[in-house]
């Protein structure tokens, strides 16, 4: 029949691997340490687990085959489409790339719109001629007309003379 | 490899310097191959996986962040590739990794280490112990075997292992603890006194 001490030892032994690796709270660790201080059987179990870890650390990795000739041959046959760093900059900085594209589109659109407006704006000479025709009866009421007093086209003079 | 030397090699390799990349390959080949071997169990698959991992690493080097170590990043590439391979193999035949001693090609895992054990010039006792430890590790489930390989054989810390496997640090520690308990029971003659 298991005594309370046996049950406690079983509980402690089940936690010794965690104790060794530090995977327990400070409170639990202290409780385990207090038990180990008075229980030789559990101390022996801890020692066995420690030796298991030591055995594992003794194992050297098996030798790996040399794959470099095959790897370098495959890398040399690859043809880069863009300079490595440039192509990966766009992949890596996707947000910045997207913002840059949007900005370029906006600026291009604004440029196109303002360019079209200048085509439809009346030429200065036409504007001045029209304005002068509308204001000639009250030349002194309109500063633009005053400025144009000497620049009326020949067509307006002919009209007045009729 | 010293961190500053490795950083310099990575910087050169990122700029397209092949000899620098070869040095990185020579540094990590053994670790990567053995990690791959534990993941897929077959020497042939481990070889393919290792080769593909380095080829992918060369292409993806510009994406390696400065706060990431090359080794951890490379292991993550291997881990992701191994998942693809296992998925592919499981479609080809009925196959399960966890709790199973079969490799991805169906052969018992114990056979994978044959031919790779210490030679006759080593002491007989050391040979016997090492063979027993390898056999015990081979018998672990995939989850346990992988963390034991990375922590005890490759010397990786728990944080790096957690990053590579994309599991919480506590999970790695639990797996290491459980693996140690299992191995302790399998290696009774070598770990118990008297």
Image (cartoon, rainbow, N blue to C red):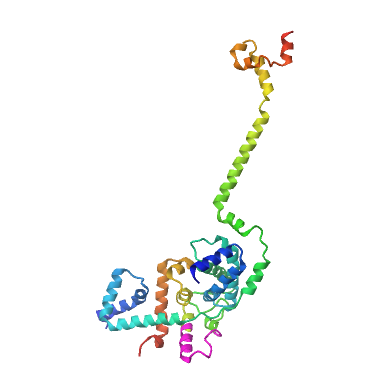
The residue that appears at 41% across and 67% down in the rendered structure is B169
The residue that appears at 36% across and 83% down in the rendered structure is A48
Give the number of marks. 0
Give the percent coordinates (x, y) of residue B132: 46, 86
Report if residue B128 lies within the magenta region: yes
For the residue pair B174 and B149, the one nearer the viewer reads as B149
The residue that appears at 43% across and 82% down in the rendered structure is A55
In screen coordinates, is A84 left or right of A22?
right
Give the percent coordinates (x, y) of residue A15: 34, 75
- Residue B70 seen: no
Task: Kindly indicate the quadrant of the structure image that contains residue B104.
Answer: bottom right
Q: Is residue A138 above or below residue B80?
A: above
Give the percent coordinates (x, y) of residue A47: 35, 82
For the residue pair B26 and A109, the one nearer the viewer reads as B26
Quadrant containing the N terminus of chain A is: bottom left
- Residue A71 seen: yes
Q: Point out the stretch of residues depicted in magenta.
A: B114-134
Q: Residue furthest top?
A: A162
Quadrant containing the C terminus of chain A is: top right
Q: Is residue A132 above or below residue A122?
A: above
Report if residue B112 lies within the magenta region: no
Task: Kindly indicate the quadrant of the structure image that contains residue A109.
Answer: top right
Q: Is residue A32 above or below residue A128?
A: below
The residue that appears at 42% across and 73% down in the rendered structure is B175
Give the percent coordinates (x, y) of residue B126: 46, 88
């Amino acid at each position: 029949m298991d005594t309370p001490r046996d049950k406690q030892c079983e509980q402690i032994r089940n936690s010794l691997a965690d104790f060794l690796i530090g995977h327990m709270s400070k409170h639990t660790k202290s409780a385990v340490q207090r038990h180990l201080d008075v229980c030789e059987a559990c101390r022996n179990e801890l020692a066995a687990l420690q030796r298991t870890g030591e055995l594992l650390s003794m194992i050297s990795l098996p030798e790996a085959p040399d794959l470099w000739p095959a790897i370098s041959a495959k890398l040399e046959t690859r043809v880069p489409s863009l300079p490595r760093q440039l192509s990966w900059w766009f992949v890596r900085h996707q947000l910045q790339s997207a913002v840059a594209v949007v900005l370029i589109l906006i600026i291009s659109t604004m440029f196109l719109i303002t360019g079209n407006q200048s085509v439809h704006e009346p030429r200065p000479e036409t504007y001045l001629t029209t304005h002068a025709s509308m204001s000639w009866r009250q030349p002194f009421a309109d500063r633009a007309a005053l400025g144009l007093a000497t620049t009326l086209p020949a067509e307006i003079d002919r009209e007045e003379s009729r | 490899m010293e961190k500053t030397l490795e950083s310099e090699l990575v910087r050169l390799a990122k700029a397209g310097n092949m000899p620098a990349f070869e040095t990185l390959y020579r540094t990590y080949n053994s670790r990567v191959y053995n990690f791959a071997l534990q993941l897929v169990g077959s020497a042939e698959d481990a070889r393919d996986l290792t080769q593909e991992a380095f080829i992918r690493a060369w292409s993806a080097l510009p994406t390696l962040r400065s706060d990431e170590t090359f080794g951890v990043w490379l292991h993550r590439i291997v881990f992701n590739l191994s998942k693809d391979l296992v998925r592919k193999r499981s479609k080809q035949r009925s196959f399960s990794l966890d709790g199973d001693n079969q490799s991805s090609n169906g052969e018992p895992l114990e056979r994978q280490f044959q031919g790779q054990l210490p030679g006759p010039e080593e002491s007989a006792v050391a040979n016997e112990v090492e063979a027993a430890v390898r056999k015990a590790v081979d018998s672990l489930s995939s989850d346990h075997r992988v963390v034991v390989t990375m922590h005890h054989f490759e010397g990786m810390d728990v944080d790096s292992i957690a990053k590579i496997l994309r599991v919480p640090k506590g999970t790695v520690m639990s797996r290491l603890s459980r693996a140690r308990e299992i191995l302790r029971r399998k290696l009774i003659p070598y770990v118990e006194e008297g």
